[in-house]
């Protein structure tokens, strides 16, 4: 942890340790001992978001659990966010001290009938049309309306703005 960072919780510490090891050595860490019990026990979708100087630098996640624990999900997605996000080049060693990281642990998905059941601060959204699916996390800077939230999720999924799509909402626990 560098001097300009606030103390990070165990979720973010695990993501940071994973990113640092992967950037420096190209290797993926194993799940370490000493984490809170729920990180070994619980299964959930997890997104790891990386910012540098306040700007998004990588964000990759899973909508639902695909690994054996939240800890494994964090490790896998931290590696992907730092090196496989197609919008960005891989993070280099010179950037490590400038990164801020957040980890979102997703709650269950709930199908909803209309956008009226969304709140951009509280709920993330998943839009689905056939095999195309896009997700946008809740409470993101610059996303102020439900209409913006749905439009961005549709764009990510390759769904046209005027195309009808199925909606699901979810809540997250965001770790800084």
Image (cartoon, rainbow, N blue to C red):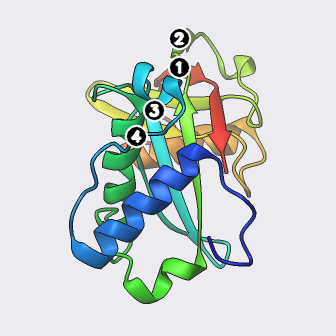
Q: Nearer the viewer, mark 3 or mark 2?
A: 2
Give whichever of 159, 12 is nearer the camera. Answer: 12
- Circles 1 and 3 in contact, beta carbons < 8 Å: no
Does label 1 or label 2 sit earlier along the sequence? 2
Report which residue position mark 4 lands on: 33
Mark 1: give few (<14), some (14-19) or many (20+) Cα within 10 Å. many
Q: Is residue 43 visible?
A: no
Q: Compared with residue 38, is residue 148 higher up or lower down, i.e. above or below? A: below
Does label 4 or label 3 sit earlier along the sequence? 4
Q: Nearer the viewer, mark 4 or mark 1?
A: 4
- Circles 4 and 1 in contact, beta carbons < 8 Å: no
- The CA distance from mark 1 to mark 2 is 4 Å
- Circles 4 and 3 in contact, beta carbons < 8 Å: no
- The CA distance from mark 4 to mark 1 is 35 Å
Mark 2: give few (<14), some (14-19) or many (20+) Cα within 10 Å. few
Give the tally of numbered discs.
Answer: 4
Residue at 39% across / 54% down in the picture?
78
**Residue 82 in the image, given as x and y percentages of width and height:** 38, 65
Give whichever of 9, 141 is nearer the camera. Answer: 9
Report which residue position mark 1 lands on: 168
Report which residue position mark 3 lands on: 163
Does label 3 or label 2 sit earlier along the sequence? 2
**Residue 134 in the image, given as x and y percentages of width and height:** 42, 38
Report which residue position mark 2 lands on: 111
**Residue 77 in the image, given as x and y percentages of width and height:** 36, 48
């Amino acid at each position: 942890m560098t001097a300009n960072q606030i103390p990070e919780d165990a979720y973010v510490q695990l993501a940071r340790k994973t990113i640092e090891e992967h950037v420096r050595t190209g290797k993926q860490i194993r799940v370490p001992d000493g984490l809170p019990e729920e990180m070994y026990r619980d299964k959930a979708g997890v997104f790891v978001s990386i910012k540098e100087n306040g700007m998004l630098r990588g964000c990759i996640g899973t909508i639902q659990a695909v690994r054996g624990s939240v800890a494994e999900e964090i490790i896998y997605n931290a590696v992907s966010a730092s090196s496989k996000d197609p919008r960005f080049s891989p993070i280099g060693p010179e950037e490590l001290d400038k990164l801020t990281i957040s980890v979102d642990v997703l709650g269950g998905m709930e199908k909803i009938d209309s956008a009226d059941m969304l709140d951009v601060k509280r709920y993330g959204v998943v839009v689905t049309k056939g095999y195309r699916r896009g997700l946008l996390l809740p409470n993101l800077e610059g996303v102020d309306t439900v209409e913006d939230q749905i439009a961005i999720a549709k764009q990510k999924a390759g769904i046209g703005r005027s195309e009808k799509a199925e909606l699901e909402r979810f809540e997250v626990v965001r770790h800084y």
